[in-house]
Image (cartoon, rainbow, N blue to C red):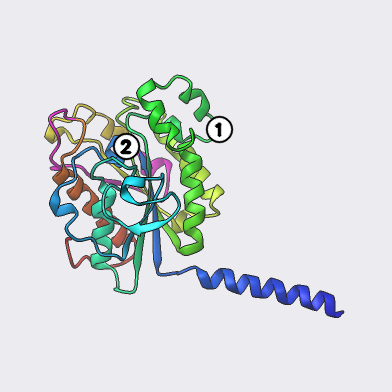
């Protein structure tokens, strides 16, 4: 083997070492997507901003000058966690509950790309354009904040996050705009499979957690969709449904209140902790 070839091999090995050393295996990253209940509809309250553990981070999905945040950079996860003026989301107390229960040397990162009112079709990377052309004008503005392609933005940010940490799960809250859609679980599987493929992830290591719409016990106008959501594990092996039973909702019976989002977020976290084989000790 000549010196030139040896030098090339050494360079490749060194680059590989540098790449792996920059990734923190104890930085758990979670992808969040969906519609208005994932982007956060409830007004953020003082108790939600008084203190956020810096171990809980958000990778900013859009530029927010008023928040002094720039797309593609990590910040302490003080809400809003979706776009610049969205509200409290299940992701808020999902992350807070995780850091309160995980070892102190583990950090949690959130990426939240969500569009109020959208169907699951918006996240289908092969067919989203057909959906966008028919989307109402009020939704177009939100979609355009993600350069017209929310799925691509989610993948773009996820690839940035993979340089810093390890993707451990995917959170979904969507379904209100797909009522009675018997093909919804299949459509979700398409999005999930695409994420796994595009990010080189394995399903058994990256479960999908899907939350129910506002429950019938709160008068949820889309509660019937929960029967379809309940069948998701039959379509996707490594998927889990998060109950919304008892989570307070707003006057529209479509969105949760701030307390409802806190409760739902904790339930997402409880399920994730169980999958990580971490015993729940604190309810943040």
Image location (x, y in percent) of residue 157: 47, 50
In the rendered view, would you say 1 is above or below 69? below
At 63% from the left edge and 70% from the top edge, which residue is drawn?
16
Quadrant including the N terminus: bottom right
Q: Residues within 10 Å of mark 1 (few under 14, many from 20)?
A: few
Q: Earlier in the sequence, mark 2 or mark 1?
A: 1
At 40% from the left edge and 35% from the top edge, which residue is drawn?
185
Along the line of sight, which residue is nearer the eye, 151 or 270?
Answer: 151
**Label 1's element?**
loop
Question: In terms of image quadrants, where is residue 10?
Answer: bottom right
Q: How far apart are the two marked residues, 2 and 1, measured between alpha carbons? A: 23 Å
Residue 182 makes an appearance in the image: no
Tell me, yes or no, whether the highlighted magenta stretch contains residue 279. no
**Label 2's element?**
helix
Image location (x, y in percent) of residue 257: 15, 40
Q: Which mark is residue 126?
A: 1
In the displayed structure image, the side of residue 42 where residue 152 appears, left or right: right
Span highlighted in magenta in the image: 229-253
Mark 2 highlights which residue?
229
Image location (x, y in percent) of residue 117: 33, 29
At 34% from the left edge and 51% from the top edge, which residue is drawn?
68
In the rendered view, would you say 273 is above or below 146? below
Q: Residues within 10 Å of mark 2 (few under 14, many from 20)?
A: many
Along the line of sight, which residue is nearer the eye, 26 or 156?
Answer: 156
Question: In terms of image quadrants, where is residue 144?
Answer: top left
Quadrant including the C terminus: bottom left
Along the line of sight, which residue is nearer the eye, 147 or 92?
Answer: 147
């Amino acid at each position: 083997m000549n010196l030139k070839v040896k030098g090339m091999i050494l360079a490749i090995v060194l680059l590989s070492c540098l790449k792996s050393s920059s990734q923190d295996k104890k930085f758990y990253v979670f992808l969040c997507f969906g519609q208005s209940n994932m982007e956060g509809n409830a007004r953020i309250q003082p108790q939600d901003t008084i203190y956020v553990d810096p171990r809980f981070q958000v990778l900013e999905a859009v530029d927010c000058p008023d928040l002094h945040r720039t797309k593609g950079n990590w910040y302490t996860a003080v809400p809003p966690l979706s776009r610049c003026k969205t509200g409290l989301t299940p992701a808020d107390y999902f992350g807070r509950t995780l850091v309160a229960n995980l070892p102190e040397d583990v950090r949690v990162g959130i990426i939240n790309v969500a569009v109020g009112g959208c169907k699951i079709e918006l996240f289908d990377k092969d067919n989203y354009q057909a959906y966008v052309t028919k989307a109402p004008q009020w939704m177009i503005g939100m979609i355009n904040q993600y350069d017209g392609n929310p799925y691509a933005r989610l993948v773009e940010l996820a690839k940035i996050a993979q340089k810093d940490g390890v993707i451990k799960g995917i959170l979904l809250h969507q379904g209100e705009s797909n009522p009675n859609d018997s093909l919804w679980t299949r459509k979700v599987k398409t999005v999930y499979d695409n994420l796994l493929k595009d990010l080189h992830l394995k399903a058994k290591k990256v479960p999908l957690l899907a939350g129910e719409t506002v429950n019938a016990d709160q008068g949820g106008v889309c509660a019937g969709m929960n029967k379809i959501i309940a069948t998701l594990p039959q379509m996707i092996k490594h998927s889990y449904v998060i109950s919304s039973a008892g989570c307070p909702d707003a006057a529209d019976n479509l969105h949760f209140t701030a307390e409802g989002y806190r409760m739902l977020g904790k339930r997402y976290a409880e399920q994730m902790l169980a999958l990580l084989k971490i015993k729940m000790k604190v309810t943040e």
